Image: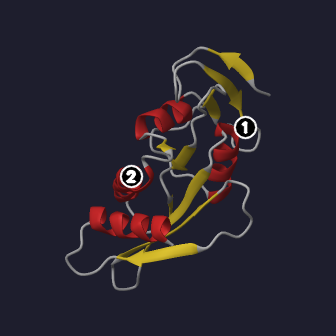
Amino acid sequence: RLRCATSAGVAGSACAGRDSGTGIHVDTARASSPRVSWLLAATPEIEAGVDLARGVELAEALRQRLIRGVGGKYQVVSREALNRMLASSGYEADAPLSEAAVRALGTQLQAAYVVCATVRVEADGRLSMAASLAPPAEANPTRETVTQEAGQSLRQVAAALADQLVNR
């Protein structure tokens, strides 16, 4: 159940709540004019063989590219704000979140869109990142996938994926 609070959250004065499905405590912006439209991109689910640090780097690069792509229309939840929400619920900073957890968190945050992503290592050792950009309640959003090319940095992989998500 949501309760009003004035703790430092995503946007200062906020309504706070705990999602029963994820246990993540969320501070959401109080409705005001004009209302903030949030876009949430958390650390992706990480499959076996992927170092958490690489997943965190991909998530941050994805957020930064999304800010450039949608910054005028949506407020991308920062890594710091997301980590405050996670910490207030007993999660570690930059904890990878499942698609269900990202959707639940996005719903509670009243995000316009969430990015649900997965990172895996291909048989040849390259990283592959798949993600969708959709409203939290959308049942089967289209996923885009980018696989790391030889010499391509993680930042470049995330940027290519963000561009595909925003421009489709």
Q: Are marks 1 and 2 in contact (CB under 8 Å)?
A: no
Element under disc 1? loop
**Residue 95 percent across, percent down from the top left:** 50, 46
**In screen coordinates, is 72 left or right of 114?**
left
Q: Residues within 10 Å of mark 1 (few under 14, many from 20)?
A: some
| Residue annotated with mark 1 | 19
Can residue 61 be seen at all in this image of the molecule?
yes
> In the picture shown, does residue 85 fall above or below 111?
above
Give the amino acid type for the residue marked by disc 1 in the picture: Asp
Query: Which scheme is used to colour this image of the protein?
Result: secondary structure
Residue at far left of view: 151
Separation of marks 1 and 2 at Cα, in angstroms: 23 Å
**Residue 72 percent across, percent down from the top left:** 44, 46
Can residue 119 be seen at all in this image of the molecule?
no
| Residue annotated with mark 2 | 56
132, 20: nearer the viewer: 132
> In the picture shown, does residue 71 fall above or below 30?
below
Residue at far bottom of view: 124
**Residue 10 percent across, percent down from the top left:** 52, 30
Residue at far top of view: 6
State the residue at coordinates (64%, 31%).
25
Q: In the figure, residue 138 lies in which quadrant? A: bottom right
